[in-house]
Amino acid sequence: MDATEIARACADAMWAEDKASRGQGMEIVSVEPGKSVLTMPVQDHMVNGHAICHGGYIFLLADSAFAFACNTYDQRTVAQSCAISFVKSARLGDVLTATAAERWREGRSGIYDITVADQTGTTVAEFRGQSRTISGRLLGHDKDGPNDPSS
């Protein structure tokens, strides 16, 4: 398998177990090494008392795109830290797209930037995540056993 096929296989393995992302109506648009694009429609249950999308759902979309981008190398990887800046409100019926891109990766650490935009291409939020590789693989077996996620 080449790097793009490995990235897609990792995404498929994660997606099968990712009830949080699937449960909010997210879809994977694309995945390649160090990158991912996910979409999510803003649904009725996501709207807060100000009639805008609750920031937690926007964070969830960005965090999911982050996860799919940093897990493209068949090494289990989790968030070490992340921060988000909300720059525009999203509303019921908007379709949000999170585009994640690796900025730096070395050893067990990485930095990823994720832009969340609405269906017009207007930026809604900017997210930066720092990743940390833990033990275990997404595909097949490794020295720790089948898909051992322990760190």
Image: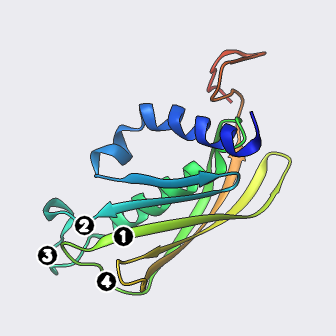
Instruction: Give me the residue at 71% from left, 36% from top.
Output: 75
Which residue lies at the image location 73% right of the left edge and 16% below the top edge? Answer: 144
Q: Earlier in the sequence, mark 4 or mark 3?
A: 3
Q: Which residue is drawn at 13% across and 64% down?
A: 44
- Would you place residue 86 above or below residue 34 in this image? below
What amino acid is found at the position of numbered circle 2 in the picture?
Answer: Val
- State yes or no: discs 1 and 2 in contact (Cβ < 8 Å): yes
The secondary element bearing badge 4 is classed as: loop
Q: Is residue 85 left or right of residue 73?
A: left
Could you give the CA–CA distance between mark 4 and mark 3, rounded to whole angstroms? Answer: 13 Å
- For disc 4, the marked residue is 89
Place of residue 9 in the rendered image (x, y in percent of width and height, measured from the top left): 60, 35
Q: First in sequence: mark 2 or mark 4?
A: 2
Could you tell me how far apart the alpha carbons at marks 2 and 4 are, in whole angstroms?
11 Å
CA separation, marks 2 and 3? 14 Å
Image mark for residue 49: 3
The dot on residue 42 is: 2
Q: Taking 106 as reference, is 127 above or below it?
A: below
